[in-house]
Image (spheres, grey):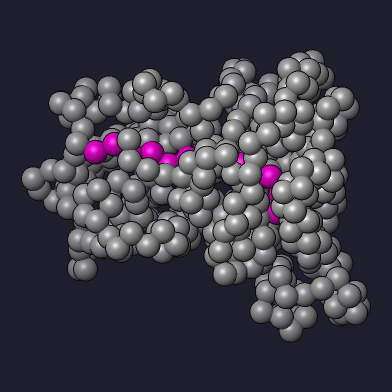
């Protein structure tokens, strides 16, 4: 069941072949520096970035303690800024699509007056991180945010803003440098400020991303294994449907609850611990919906582990087949796809040289990810442009590094 649809006006067709070269500044950095000097005068003392991500396979498995296989993107959120002499924090966003006002000012949190969520919505992400930062008290500062990660496009614009904020705070008042705690703190910020009960995948990959590698993340132990994605004959094409269905916000927590309820009914800590045999044995005691949700999660965790090994062996055909199975399971059992994403996958799969294609991220709009021969990318884009009913945006990307200082 799909709610109302928002089609963004964008008709761009953009291609990122990789992160900006060593000598040239990325567009968001340039913009953030320019706006900083306009609003606050002078040059910022600090400049940091954090990437968005695309998940190759392992969807809706992270909050079930399962596996995910994302890679960090060359699409980044940049924050530049400087310390102030008082305790005020002033944040300006230049992000397209952020709600008004684009400038907020508040007093740095203290034990007696913590920050609380509010409006504008975009400010809840940095505010949540500032509130939960592990090495406070945070001093006053001015900062400007700029991003090339499309907002709400399923490429993890939220986590990239949270992790960029944390990385910025580390330059102002350093913490102990624990990278796992950093990701967990950003996740906590998202749970408590914007109020989205997300898993750990997005924050983790934005912190730990590695150039040339996708990471197989075990969301229970929080261990990550790098899998190389450097074959020049293999490409990852992201297609943004530029569609976002309104139900995204309410459906995600509902899915999470259904999974937790089913794990309890199976007497397991998490669905990661259940096998298909155990699920089948208890089928009569479960609602049809819970049975289907669990079937997706259990089979998806298995597919993700298999896909990582297929990648290691260079078996792209098998990887692609698992991607398609993942999409079908998300569409039929988890019910988080939508007609636009299904259409994009169907069109991509018609193109010779495409190994596999699936929706990526939370669902109900946003992007698909397609694994294909590099020589097939132009044809795939062209075919999608011609046949897709909407206005797609393309990103041909390479796995990029996690957050850092510019
Ligand atoms: C969103 C969440 C992630 C993950 C995905 C689905 O991106 O933030 O934690 O659950 O959906 O795989």
> Residue 396: which quarter of the image?
top right
User: How many numbered callouts?
Assistant: 0
**Which residue is depicted at the point 41% across and 64% down?**
181
> Residue 108: which quarter of the image?
bottom left
Q: Please, is residue 137 above or below residue 157 in the view?
A: below
> Residue 300: which quarter of the image?
bottom right
Task: Name the quarter where the C terminus is drawn.
Answer: top left
- In front here: 73 or 95? 73
- Is residue 196 shown left or right of residue 305? left
Q: Please, is residue 237 above or below residue 226 in the view?
A: above
Determine if residue 34 is in view: yes
- Residue segment shown in magenta: 46-58
- Is residue 304 shown left or right of residue 213? right
The magenta stretch spans residue 54: yes
- In front here: 39 or 183? 183
Q: Please, is residue 321 above or below residue 10 in the view?
A: below
Which residue lies most toward the bottom here? 267
Predominant SS of the magenta segment: strand
The magenta stretch spans residue 306: no
**Which residue is depicted at the point 57% across and 39% down?**
212
Which residue lies most toward the left here? 85
- Is residue 308 shown left or right of residue 296? left
* Residue 160 x %, y %: 46, 44
* Residue 187 x %, y %: 47, 59
- Is residue 262 shown left or right of residue 133? right
**Which residue is depicted at the point 87% across and 25% down?**
352
- In front here: 222 or 338? 222
**Which residue is depicted at the point 86% across and 71% down?**
276
* Residue 62 x %, y %: 63, 60
Determine if residue 4 is in view: no
* Residue 33 x %, y %: 28, 26
């Amino acid at each position: 069941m799909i709610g109302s649809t928002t089609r963004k006006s964008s008709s761009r067709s953009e291609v990122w072949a990789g992160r900006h070269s060593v000598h040239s500044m990325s567009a968001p950095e340039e913009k953030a520096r320019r706006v900083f000097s306009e609003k606050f005068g002078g040059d910022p003392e600090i400049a940091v970035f954090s990437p968005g991500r695309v998940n190759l396979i392992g969807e809706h498995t992270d909050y079930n303690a399962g596996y995910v296989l994302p890679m960090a993107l060359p699409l980044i959120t940049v924050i530049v800024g400087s310390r102030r002499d008082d305790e005020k924090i002033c944040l300006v966003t230049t992000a397209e699509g952020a709600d008004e006002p684009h400038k907020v000012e508040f007093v740095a949190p203290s034990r007696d007056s913590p920050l609380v969520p509010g409006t504008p919505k975009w400010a809840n992400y940095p505010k949540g991180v500032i509130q939960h930062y592990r090495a406070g008290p945070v001093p006053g500062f001015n900062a400007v945010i700029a991003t090339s990660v499309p907002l709400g496009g399923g490429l993890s614009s939220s986590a990239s803003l949270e992790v960029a904020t944390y990385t910025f705070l580390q330059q102002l008042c350093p913490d102990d440098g624990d990278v796992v705690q950093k990701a967990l703190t950003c996740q906590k910020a998202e749970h408590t400020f914007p109020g989205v009960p997300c898993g750990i995948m997005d924050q983790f990959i934005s912190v730990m991303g590695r150039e040339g590698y996708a990471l197989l993340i075990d969301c229970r132990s929080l261990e990550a294994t790098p899998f190389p994605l450097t074959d020049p004959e293999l490409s990852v094409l992201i297609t943004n449907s530029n569609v976002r269905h309104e139900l995204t916000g309410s459906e995600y927590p509902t899915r999470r609850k259904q999974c937790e309820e089913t794990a309890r009914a199976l007497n397991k800590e998490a669905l990661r611990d259940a096998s298909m045999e155990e699920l089948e044995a208890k089928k009569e005691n479960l609602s049809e919906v819970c049975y289907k949700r669990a079937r997706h999660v259990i089979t998806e965790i298995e597919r993700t582990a298999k896909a990582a090994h297929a990648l290691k062996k260079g078996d792209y055909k098998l990887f692609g087949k698992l991607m398609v199975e993942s999409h079908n399971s998300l569409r039929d059992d988890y019910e988080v796809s939508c007609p636009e994403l299904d259409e994009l996958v169907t069109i991509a799969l018609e193109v010779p040289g495409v190994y596999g294609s699936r929706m990526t991220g939370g669902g109900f709009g946003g992007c698909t990810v397609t694994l294909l021969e590099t020589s097939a990318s132009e044809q795939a884009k062209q075919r999608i442009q011609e046949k897709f009913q909407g206005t797609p945006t393309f990103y041909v990307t390479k796995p990029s590094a996690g957050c850092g200082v510019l």
